[in-house]
Image (cartoon, helix red, strand yellow):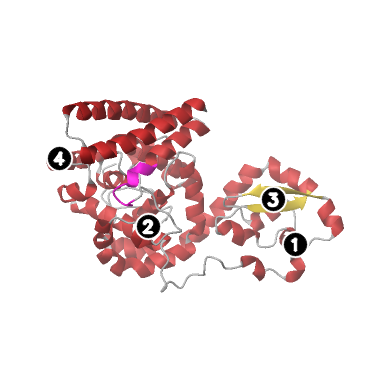
Amino acid sequence: MKSFLYITFAIVVSHCWLLKADGKSTTSEHVYQGDTIRNNIDSIEARKIEDVINSPTPPSKDKVQYVSLVSKYGFRNLFRNYSYNSSLPYSSQVNPYAENYMQDYLESHKKFLRRLKENSMSYFNYIDGILSQYGLPKELKYLAVIESNLKSNALSVAGARGPWQFMSYTARGYGLRVNQYVDDRTDYYKSTNAAAKYLLTLYKDLKDWLLVIAAYNGGPGRVYSAIKKSGSRDFWKLQYYLPEESRNHVKKFIATHYIMESFDKNDDLEPANFDYASLAPKSDLQLDSDESSGDSSLILSGRYKASVIATKLEMDISEFNHYNPGFDNSLARGDSFNMRLPADKMQIFIENKYPILNECVEQLLGSLDENTKPADKLQKNSGMSSKKR
């Protein structure tokens, strides 16, 4: 833990020093010191990121914390303070270049994106959970929107498939099975883990999420070529050295993030402070003394579904809801829920927690595939990417 804190401090100080040096230092001594510090930091970052990518089991907490700290700087060309703060006005945070850049795409697609926003909370919460295991910014979940409109069976003309639109050779390189019998690219859990590793691989060298998104679309070779031709790693300076499709991919990402995250008075979505618990029958909100004295509780988060849990525990759904009013609505918003069950049922749940979660996710993803059929129109209009990955 001490080593993590030391490295964390070094990174923050070094980033601040380099930003200051870039603006004020002109001496060869400062340039040399800056290069030395940057090279040392690059080496540490690369090792830590590789450890997370290559970990056969969930990465250790200290490595994830380190990657999370490092990766937030990757949005320095999108947000003025490196990362997005949902409590502040969107326009006060986003790079002015980005606001103008995404306007035409917003005009054409904002209605569809708002509809998708209403139906996609299950997807986003699920992807968030996986990205956080790798220390990745949650904003990256919107890449799956522009790749596939969140459809698990999306297939491009070039053969890229699944929510993250992997080509078969790249998918195999990140541990996914692709053959005539099995295609893990359509498996949300497996493909999202593979996407997280692939995104980290790109970030390890590019260190800028806008460049990563361009590389995810057109291949890293084209981004490196643009860097060489422009002499810059700033997306706004090198964008016109990129293929138009890759440049527009970044535009779609920024616009999608704006719609999904910002508050718009014209949105017809439910307000953030809507009291879902008020929808439950009043008689369900209280347990009697005998029930509460013999139950157990467990704090849950994730894509659990009341009907699946009730079936697996051989409980009537009305009984489950009696113990847990507002269960589905709370988890759908991304909140944690203190689930209460009779002690014997809780034991069964704990023993079967992950198989139950898998079935819940499969049901949620299946229902969302049906709800996002309008995505076909957007996919046709915007064109599915001819991937180079």
Q: Which residues are magenta?
A: 72-80
Residue designated by label 1: 322
Outermost residue toward the right in this view: 290
Residue designated by label 2: 257
At x 18% / y 48%, what residue is drawn? 237
Which of pointers 3 and 1 indicates the residue nearer the eye? 1
Q: Amino acid at mark 2?
A: His
Residue designated by label 3: 312
Which of pointers 2 and 3 indicates the residue nearer the eye? 2
Label 1 with label 2: CB-CB less than 8 Å: no
* In the image, residue 77 lies in the stretch drawn in magenta: yes
From the viewer's side, name the closer residue of 76 and 192. Answer: 76
Q: Amino acid at mark 1?
A: His
Q: CA distance from mark 2 to mark 3?
A: 37 Å
Which of pointers 3 and 4 indicates the residue nearer the eye? 4
Q: Is residue 263 above or below residue 97?
A: below
Of labels 1 and 2, earlier in sequence is 2
Asked whether, in this view, residue 34 is left or right of residue 27, the answer is: right
Which of pointers 4 and 2 indicates the residue nearer the eye? 4
Of labels 3 and 1, earlier in sequence is 3
Q: CA distance from mark 1 to mark 2?
A: 37 Å
Crowd rating for badge 3 (residues with CA inside 10 Å; few <14, some 14–19, many 20+):
some
Q: Is residue 267 above or below residue 296?
A: below
From the viewer's side, name the closer residue of 61 and 52. Answer: 61
Residue designated by label 4: 231
Label 3 with label 1: CB-CB less than 8 Å: no
At x 47% / y 49%, what residue is drawn? 127
Asked whether, in this view, residue 79 is left or right of residue 123, the answer is: left
Residue 296 visible at all: yes
